Amino acid sequence: EDQVTQSPEALRLQEGESSSLNCSYTVSGLRGLFWYRQDPGKGPEFLFTLYSAGEEKEKERLKATLTKKESFLHITAPKPEDSATYLCAVRITGNQFYFGTGTSLTVIP
Amino acid sequence: DTEVTQTPKHLVMGMTNKKSLKCEQHMGHRAMYWYKQKAKKPPELMFVYSYEKLSINESVPSRFSPECPNSSLLNLHLHALQPEDSALYLCASSPLENYGYTFGSGTRLTVV
């Protein structure tokens, strides 16, 4: 059965304290893994797409990496404005995504 | 134009009402989606339209009726909803292959 699992469920960091979020997946026919950021009451905002193991993408304080079983979203020296829920999603054969349950990140000043 | 626009942003409706949610995009995307999201949960897929044809219906109750009048517009018609249908309804679009979605900001629906 296709599954996407994110951990931890919630994460509290001090400003400047780097950490990583995990997205583990067991799917057949992976066509891409996507990271989104979602602020309360808003739609998810696209961050990264990763297609193959070993691929890395960076944007400001965020870096996403991909292996054959999981993806990590590394946050370097986070700021309070990085507080949000981070969702990963996998696209499988066909035209639909499976979303993980998300990691709620709080960065404390 | 790189946006998906959803209207209205907020909607309160009674259980006997009929209302519609609207979604519009002008990015030339040929796939459009409706998702439902409850608080502190990930988005759940409801419907997928590809080239204006319904391609996926995730066993959604018939009180939700999607419509895709053209390649830029997607509607969700609501009738006889239940309080448990209260949620954030998200529209998204994408090119058909190997791209992420662009989401709208959602419609916050409350059924009273």
Image (cartoon, rainbow, N blue to C red):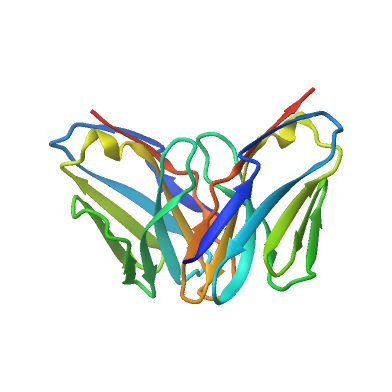
Viewport quadrant of the C terminus of chain B: top left
Residue B98 visible from this viewpoint? no
Extreme residue toward the front, this view: A1
Going by the image, does A31 lie left or right of A74? left
Extreme residue toward the left, this view: B16
Q: Residue at x 79, y 61 (%)?
A: A57
Going by the image, does A38 lie left or right of A14? left
Q: Residue at x 37, y 38 (%)?
A: B87
State the image coordinates of residue A76 (x, y, percent, origin top left).
Answer: 85, 43
Q: How many marks?
A: 0
Residue B104 versus residue A90 in the image, above or below = above
Viewport quadrant of the N terminus of chain B: bottom right
Say which quarter of the image contains residue A91.
Answer: bottom right
State the image coordinates of residue B86 (x, y, percent, origin top left).
Answer: 32, 36
Say which quarter of the image contains residue B47.
Answer: bottom left
Going by the image, does B12 lie left or right of B9? left
Going by the image, does A74 lie left or right of A105? right
Residue B102 versus residue A61 in the image, above or below = below
Residue A48 visible from this viewpoint? yes
Q: Residue at x 49, y 49 (%)?
A: B104
Residue B3 versus residue A42 in the image, above or below = below
Q: Residue at x 41, y 60 (%)?
A: B33
